[in-house]
Amino acid sequence: MNKNLPEAIRIIREAMAMSSTDPAATVAQALDDVRLLVDPERPAGTVLHRAAAGGWERAPQGQPEYPADTEQPERPELPKRHAQETDLEQQARAWDEACERARRAADTIRLHVGAHPAFQGVQVDGDRLLVSLHIVDQRQWGEWRTYFGISHDKERPLPYVVGGDGHRDGVRVSVVAYDLPEARAHALRIAKAPYELEGLVYDLALPQQDVNGGTWFFEGARAEDGMPLLSQDGRPEQARLSDLTRQAGGLTPVTDNPSQLVTPVMTTLTGGAGNA
């Protein structure tokens, strides 16, 4: 059944209930007002088809498909960014360009971090990327977040995974970090003086080293808002833990037995954060 029939019946009944010297004209006008009548003078819509050589080509809506052995009418090819492109053609080209950017970004990610033990894979999903990681130590997650431009408020915690949305090279990226909740729970269990900041657990009982080799110590001082204040050995200056994690490139605990499970994420993670 034509799905427009119930609406057409309702419109006709309302029109017939109106007092009019020409009921037929009233009904016809009511149907036309809600676009249930076909205007033969209205130009046919345009449907885009993927061309054999790539790109798009126009075909009027409802135009029959031509068999392969039938000579098809010539269609002039439009140059890229043609001034007479329709909105639909511009959208189609923009979609192709976005998908190509995503493919290039995926290739770059594979090149930079494809050999990292935590990296499981990247898939192209149209104009965005889907990345899977296996996190065995929660300290790595901060570096991965930086690499993919994921802020803590964009995380989606689930029982066995943590998801996050960010950008890399201007491409949307959805990341799934398997076993990260367990890695965080383990960090809380073994820390003597745990402090959680933006989803990462810091053991303040241990010295913390920044990427430049500087070592920072927590001696019990805190800011008015409760943020731990750290200082370098022998220096009176103190720095907020939150400032150190942002400005000093992250912190790594200094232990006598460093974890063999943690492999630095190049630069850590070559190329820094993705561009939004």
Image (cartoon, helix red, strand yellow):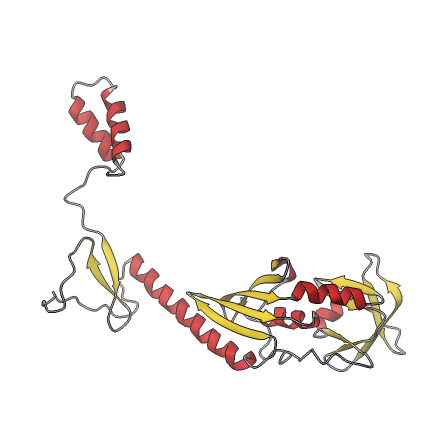
Using the image, determine if residue 72 lies above or below residue 224: below
Using the image, determine if residue 251 lies above or below residue 37: below
Relative to 213, is 108 on the left or the right? left
Residue 240 in view:
no
- Name which quarter of the figure residue 258 lies in: bottom right
The residue located at (23%, 32%) in the rendering is 31
- Name which quarter of the figure residue 140 lies in: bottom right
Residue 250 in view:
yes
Q: Nearer the viewer, residue 10 or 270?
A: 10
Relative to 265, is 235 on the left or the right? right
Where residue 187 appears, as percent x and y from the top left, is 76, 67
Where residue 11 appears, as percent x and y from the top left, is 27, 28
Q: Nearer the viewer, residue 75 or 115?
A: 115
Looking at the rendered structure, the number of numbered marks drawn on it comes to 0
The residue located at (67%, 63%) in the rendering is 181
The residue located at (73%, 70%) in the rendering is 245
Where residue 42 appears, as percent x and y from the top left, is 18, 46
Where residue 221 appears, as percent x and y from the top left, is 88, 64
Relative to 275, is 87 on the left or the right? left
The residue located at (75%, 70%) in the rendering is 244
Relative to 227, is 62 on the left or the right? left
Q: Quadrant of the N terminus?
A: top left
